[in-house]
Image (spheres, helix red, strand yellow):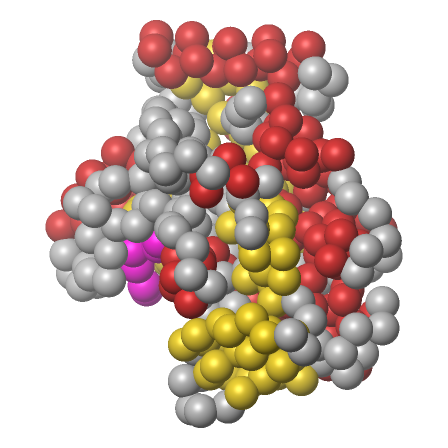
Amino acid sequence: MIGVSIAAECAERGAEVVLVDKAEPGSGTSSVSYAWVNSNNKEPSSYYALNRAGMAAHYKLANNGNEWFRPTGHVEFATSTVHADQLQARLDRLRARGYEVEKISGNSLTDLVPDLIEPQNVKTAAYFPHEGHCFPRLYVRNQLQRAQQSGVRLLTRLSVEALTETPSGVKVHLSDGTLLMADHVISAVGRWTNTITAAAGIGPVVAEFQHPGDVTVGYLATTNPLNISLTRVLTTPELNIRPHEGGRLLLQALDLDTSAVAGDDPDLGSDIAKEFIKRLRRVLRNTDDATINSISVGQRAMPLDGLSIIGVAPAVPWLYMVATHSGVTLAPYLGPTVAAEVMGEKTDPLLDNFRPARLLASGLPSLPLPPRYPGQQ
């Protein structure tokens, strides 16, 4: 989503752009994202502000008419004291920042989610009316059409093997022997960013999978089409649910992620798949005939310190890097913003705290990643 957005924007500004994808556009991280558009629990304040800008960019596109963004709102409720305290603290913090949120009663939950099985012992509940969800494949298709209409050349199923600086530009060596010459290389490859930094002769900047359940991996399950009344993103103590394409539901349960292994998708008859269905039937009505149609282990693009990487690499002025969690929320904002920086039009102060120098200047520190708890994405 991010790469094709930048490509389209650069081309529309007059650049000659070649878009290189090691597979097919949208088949990487974008295809295994929960795709919740929000700035709900984004810290610190600079990251919150960046995600607010991403939300605004989605709304701007929605006002122009699109098929991929669903600004339907988000409902979350807590039944444990720990989750309730965390949710209340988040509500207080968001209100102070002017974020749109309504604290609601437990009785109001079924008004917003009619097929919700009324939960017992709700301690805190909230409605975030301006949040929503996105269909990444539709977004990528639209932006790719836009890019190609502006002259972007698309090369697929090719990887970058090496990047060589020369007096006349950068040589980009591709896996089939193709050699491209460029003034600028923009890396928007998410969790594969370390392969690009290695090709440029610099160190790693994103976390890589180390053990089951680490922050880079998580299950994402899709149901069969269901006759159910759910239009909003729903966060519950045991299951996160949102509408998916074709009347299906997308399911996520962060506590189950402890067994997730990169590249090892569970079988449809696995205990994990069965647990998703059990939880779904406890949360929503009209799910007796629900089945899991697909389940995958998504791998997140997660910088070493958990925050976005956006900017020119130190000592490699021709390499502009973008690697971030929350890529779905940020894509429509980063497209024009990064293009403007690369094309020399202007820099964006919202990006000041996310420059790559912080990770490359002092021995590549591996900093603590954000904690995970019920409701956190």
Q: Where residue 324 sits: x, y (%)? A: 51, 46
168 or 235: nearer the eye? Answer: 168
Q: In the image as oriented, which residue stretches furthest toward the front?
A: 167
Viewer-proximal residue, 71 or 10?
10
**Position of 324 compared to 253: left or right?**
right
Q: Is residue 145 above or below residue 35?
A: below
Asked whether residue 146 is drawn in magenta, I would say: no
The residue at the point 59 percent across, 37 percent down is 354
Residue shown at the point (25%, 40%) measured from the top left: 214
Q: Answer with the quarter of the image where residue 4 lies.
A: bottom right
Residue 45 in view of the camera = yes
Q: Is residue 190 above or below residue 107?
A: below
Placement of the C terminus among the 4 image quadrants: top left
Residue at the bottom extreme of this rendering: 177
The answer to whether residue 129 is seen in the rendering is: no
Q: Position of residue 325 (x, y in %)?
A: 49, 44
Judge whether 31 appears above or below 157 on screen. Answer: above
Of the 4 image quadrants, the one containing the N terminus is bottom right
**Picture coordinates of residue 173 (x, y %)?**
48, 81
- Give the number of marks: 0
In the picture provided, is 333 more to the left or to the right than 370?
right
- The image shows residue 34 at horizontal and vertical percentages of 46, 49
Q: Is residue 295 magenta?
A: yes
Q: Residue at x 71, y 34 (%)?
A: 350
Q: Say left or right for 288 vs 330.
A: left
Residue at 34 percent across and 27 percent down: it is: 368
The kind of secondary structure the magenta stretch mainly shows is strand
Quarter of the figure with residue 224:
bottom left
Task: Judge by depth and name the residue closer to the eye, 292 or 66.
Answer: 66
Stretch of the chain drawn in magenta? 293-300
Q: Which of the pair 234/219 is nearer the observer? A: 219
